[in-house]
Image (cartoon, helix red, strand yellow):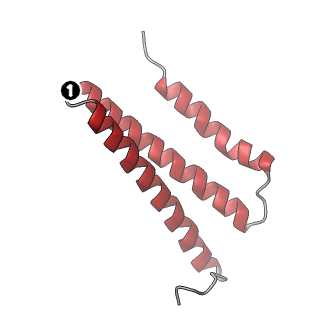
């Protein structure tokens, strides 16, 4: 069962969703672990953890959208840029410091 290719729409959706969740969780766990090691306590640590969780969620979304486009035969370098660009812009805007 695990060696068969997903050919039905439901199984493809489950594979793409699982891939996106796994990538998002791994990126989040890695970034939170790095932040926890670098900053020991205080508000800076909480901000770093939140930042890591946000970036992991964004990475999962980008991977999920790219995988969905790949399944639908709509993935080209141009569409990949258009999928990733809003997430990059959002991260830049959310990461700026307020004066």
Which residue: 27% across, 31% down?
45
Most foreground residue, 93 or 42:
42
User: Residue 61's spot in the image, x, y percent?
Assistant: 55, 51
| Residue that extends furthest to the left in the rendered view of this protein | 41
On screen, residue 76 versus residue 58, left or right, reads: right
User: Residue 35's spot in the image, x, y percent?
Assistant: 33, 36
On screen, residue 45 versus residue 52, left or right, reads: left
Q: Quadrant of the C terminus?
A: top left
Above or below residue 61? Residue 70 is below
User: Residue 13's spot in the image, x, y percent?
Assistant: 58, 71
On screen, residue 74 versus residue 49, left or right, reads: right
Secondary structure beneath dot 1 equals loop
Above or below residue 51? Residue 60 is below
Which residue: 59% across, 39% down?
87
User: Residue 38's spot in the image, x, y percent?
Assistant: 30, 31
* Residues packed near mark 1 inside 10 Å, few (<14), some (14 to 19) or many (20 plus): few
Above or below residue 26? Residue 2 is below
| Residue that extends furthest to the bottom in the rendered view of this protein | 1
Q: Name the residue that disc number 1 marks.
A: 42
Above or below residue 44? Residue 34 is below
The quadrant holding residue 84 is top right
The quadrant holding residue 7 is bottom right
The quadrant holding residue 12 is bottom right
């Amino acid at each position: 069962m695990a060696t068969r290719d997903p050919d039905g729409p439901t199984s493809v959706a489950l594979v793409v969703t699982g891939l996106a969740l796994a990538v998002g969780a791994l990126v989040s766990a890695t970034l939170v672990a790095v932040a926890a090691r670098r900053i020991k306590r205080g508000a800076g640590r909480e901000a770093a953890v939140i930042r890591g969780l946000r970036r992991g969620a964004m990475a999962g979304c980008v991977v999920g959208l790219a995988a969905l486009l790949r399944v639908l035969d709509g993935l080209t370098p141009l569409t990949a840029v258009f999928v990733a660009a809003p997430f990059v812009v959002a991260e830049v805007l959310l990461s700026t410091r307020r004066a």
